[in-house]
Image: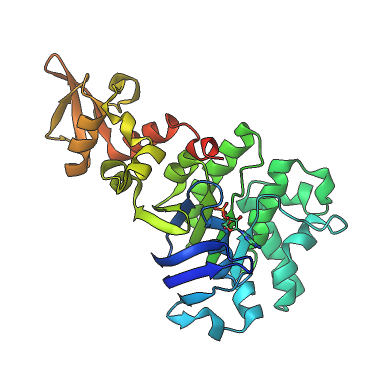
Amino acid sequence: MIKFDRVSKLYDDRTKAVDQLDLHIQDNEFFVLIGPSGCGKTTTLKMINRLIDASDGTILIEDKKITDYDIHELRWNIGYVLQQIALFPHMTIAENIAIVPELKKWSRKKVHDRVDELLDMVGLDPAVYRDRKPGELSGGQQQRIGVARALAADPRIILMDEPFSALDPISREKLQNDMLHLKRTINKTIVFVTHDIREAFKLGDRICIMKEGRALQVGTPDEILQGPATPFVREFVGAHKQEEGIDLEAIILPLDGSGALHCIPADASLSEVLDILSKHERVLVEKAGIPIGQIDRRTIIEYMASHMDERGRENE
Ligand code: ADP
């Protein structure tokens, strides 16, 4: 879908923001770029829709070089959501969402129906919100409009640059949960920048950990937790905490009679749990020889995500 082939970006002042980056982002994948501030995440993202041009290497979308696309066509077919969404203050919410469909000259009826559909999709009642002005919405609601606007003309690709990081923790969590739901219901390739490792593990199908313009590791949350490629990655994702204990009883799922064959004791360490779950989708948890519940990969990844520090912030 999106391919980076030895892509570099050297800014005019000789800052090397991205250094020979190779990436293969799959169709319909939720792909997260994460790393400390200044590691090149935003530059990487903006090179995809050519807000920034690469100095070297090639970026392909569906096997065609991005420089061979008409620039307007390229931008209209890539949704873009920023940290502080810039809604036009004098336009209504409906008009703000409809910008790209209008540019594409959709019919009035099609635009109207699409706006209502999108407002519903992001959890805002069209009857209440379509005629409001951005100033009448909370920060979280404005970000939802930003997501709706990016989806408006049904682009195949959505780029999201720290879209939730300016929100209070409750709104952020709510939008993350909505995003999880949305990613299951819409078929989009999403490239998402964050410096919050919990957000990355919660949302990402695959995660690319960047440092100094390079990709240190690309993999699923399980792969990265179980096999951090470098000491930096290990530290960054908190994998060094795996030797610590884990309160399995607090997170086990009820037994459902589906007969998982492998067992671990309830007092197993996190690394033991990760080790067995790398081989089996789920396992039974037993206490004094009696099964008390079961645990699966998803539960343990969510547990890891919720117990991590916001590591990126520490590096700022
Ligand atoms: P991140 O998104 O990971 O914080 P950026 O891609 O914004 O990183 O920046 C990568 C590096 O490039 C940083 O050192 C940053 O200071 C530098 N940089 C970003 N934009 C410019 C620019 N327009 N001119 C010069 N240097 C820049």
Q: Quadrant of ligand 1?
A: bottom right
On the image, the x and y values in percent for residue 286 come to: 17, 21
Reply above or below: 75 against 195: below
Residue at the limit of the structure toward the top, as seen here: 288
Q: Is residue 155 visible?
A: no
Residue nearest the viewer, comparing 294 with 81? 81
- In this rendering, the answer to whether 266 lies above or below 133 is above
Q: Could you say which is closer to the camera, residue 221 or residue 171?
A: 221
Which residue is rendered at x = 16% and y = 26% of the image? 264
Labels in figure, total: 0
Question: What residue is shown at x 83% (from left), y 54% (from top)?
Answer: 131
Q: Position of residue 128 (x, y in %)?
A: 78, 47
Q: Residue furthest front?
A: 14
- State the quadrant of the C terminus: top right
Tell me residue 276's x, y (percent): 18, 36
- Look at the image and tell me in which quarter the N terminus lies: bottom left
Q: Nearer the viewer, residue 36 or 258?
A: 36
Q: Residue 69 location, x and y as percent?
A: 57, 83
- In the depicted structure, whether residue 254 falls above or below residue 31: above
**What colouring does the structure picture have?**
rainbow
Relative to 73, does residue 259 appear above or below in the rendering?
above
Is residue 9 something one can see in this rendering? yes
Residue placed at 61% from the left, 84% from the top?
A: 70
Q: Is residue 259 left or right of residue 110?
A: left
Residue appearing at x 59%, y 69% in the figure:
78
Q: Is residue 239 left or right of residue 125?
A: left
